[in-house]
Image (cartoon, rainbow, N blue to C red):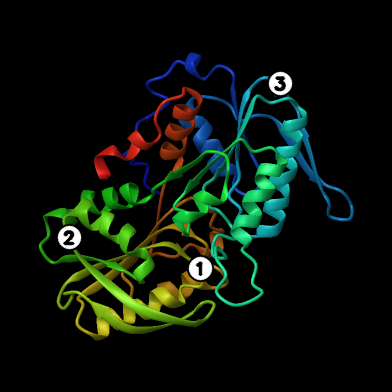
Amino acid sequence: MSSQSVFGKTQSDSNGSHLEGMKLFAGSAHVELGQRVAAALGIELGRMMNSQFADGEIRIMVEESARGNDIFILQPTCAPTNDNCMELFIMLDAFRRASARNITVVMPYYGYARQDKKVKPREPITARLVADILEMCGATRVVAIDLHAEQIQGFFTIPVDHLYGFPILGQYFVDRGYREMDDVVVVSPDVAGVGRASSLAKMIGAGLVVINKRRPRPNVTEVVEIVGEFEGKRCIMIDDMIDTGGSIINGANALIDRGASEVRVCCSHPVLSKDATHRLQASCISEIVTLDTIPIAPEMLVPKLTILPSAPLLADAIRRIHCNESVSELFGDYK
């Protein structure tokens, strides 16, 4: 796993005094990421007991004072999504009742984000429901990386800091010389992701290609057309998440079949359901680059998979929030 980052080294430029009154706790969804963020901040993770009753109910016990503190809870709501969401709600209630001054939920991955609007009659808007429950449970702020839809920020009445993963992904390709190559294009796998792909393309000085696809049902896509020049070029496809890998593989196959020289893919959230990594390993894709916003089981690791750290970004954002500094300045060089 690469340790390089385009963001500041929070630990090296601090003596801890500016973080007084702040505590970071991690739920069980991604304890390792919580530990890495704490190390980047130069602090220890807060002490909290997480267990279950005999019938599977979640039991949370905060083992140190939270009164009057800025509390940060790190918990991606990844699989098992329902358990991790419920655990987060219970943690919020515990800290609210412990008289915390502020409670910021750090959700590197925001689960249920794909249900952000009504497409058919009688469908729920689950992304809004999760936002409502977070606020009801006591969250005073939310931090997330690459929301599936940016309008989710508007589902909250509390502040939302939306962080972007493309600078980390882009720096990876810059370090490998892709900015000096004249045969590189960045590909958006759908029209909705054009903004993300455009930002990466500008960062590495590449052209932009867009795949127009239709989705007849969840996790199933069909490529309709590809807009842009990509024949004989190295393609970097970027998306916010890879779930089953089906749409990414279909897009890569379409690019290769129509003349692309190679396809590499990158994303912020490695959802990687079922046997996704093994399907990606067996595909025409040369490399899969992702952040560590979601834990990846050892049996899911494959040679083509490269995992980049998100802890420096999260740590810098947490420090800025606690110190009342601008979070948007983190991305000032990339706008």
Identify the residue at horizontal 55%, vertical 66% (top origin). Answer: 117
- In terms of secondary structure, where does tag 2 sit? loop
Identify the residue at horizontal 51%, vertical 68% (top origin). Answer: 243
Q: Could you say which is closer to the camera, residue 301 or residue 44? A: 44
Query: Where residue 172 appears, x then y in whole percent?
Result: 28, 51
Residue underneath mark 2 = 206
The correct choice, above or below, for 93 with respect to 186 in the image is above
Query: Where residue 150 appears, x then y in whole percent?
Result: 45, 54
Name which quarter of the figure residue 112 lies in: bottom right
Identify the residue at horizontal 31%, vertical 64% (top origin). Answer: 194
| Viewer can see residue 238 | no
Residue underneath mark 1 = 243
N-terminal-most mark, 3 or 1: 3
Q: Could you say which is closer to the camera, residue 207 or residue 5? A: 207
Using a 10 Å C-alpha cutoff, classify the residue at mark 3 as few (fewer than 14 neighbours), some (14 to 19) or many (20 or more): some
- In terms of secondary structure, where does tag 3 sit? loop
Residue 250 in the figure: left or right of residue 140:
left
